[in-house]
Image (tube, rainbow, N blue to C red):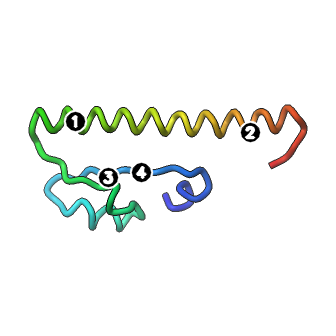
Amino acid sequence: MKKSRKEYGWEFIFIGANIDACAEAERFGIRRERAVNYIHDDRVQSLYMKEYHRLCALQWKQILQWLWKRICLKINGKKK
């Protein structure tokens, strides 16, 4: 994960249930501020899912921008 963060600029989130989510996230190289404890509650779960989908959309936007840049560089004969 550390390589993906550095090489591609990816960010990860960690949702943990019945554990110390922040401590466990750090074990995987995920920053504490990107970790949350899961609470089993319909209202809270809805908020988690909305935020998860928002973050996924942002991540896909970054991936598509990276791919487009690579394609443009290849078309123009430049190497990266």
Mark 4 or mark 2: whose residue is earlier in sequence: 4
Q: Residues within 10 Å of mark 1 (few under 14, many from 20)?
A: few
Where residue 57 appears, as percent x and y from the top left, is: 45, 32
Front label number (1 vs 4):
1
Mark 1 or mark 3: whose residue is earlier in sequence: 3
Badge 4 amino acid: Phe
Quarter location, residue 33: bottom left
C-alpha gap between disc 1 and disc 3: 15 Å
76 in relation to 12, above or below = above
What residue would you read off at disc 4?
Answer: 12
Residue located 58% across and 38% down the image: 63
Badge 1 amino acid: Leu
What residue would you read off at disc 2?
Answer: 70
C-alpha gap between disc 4 and disc 3: 7 Å
Mark 3 or mark 2: whose residue is earlier in sequence: 3
Q: Is residue 15 left or right of residue 80?
A: left
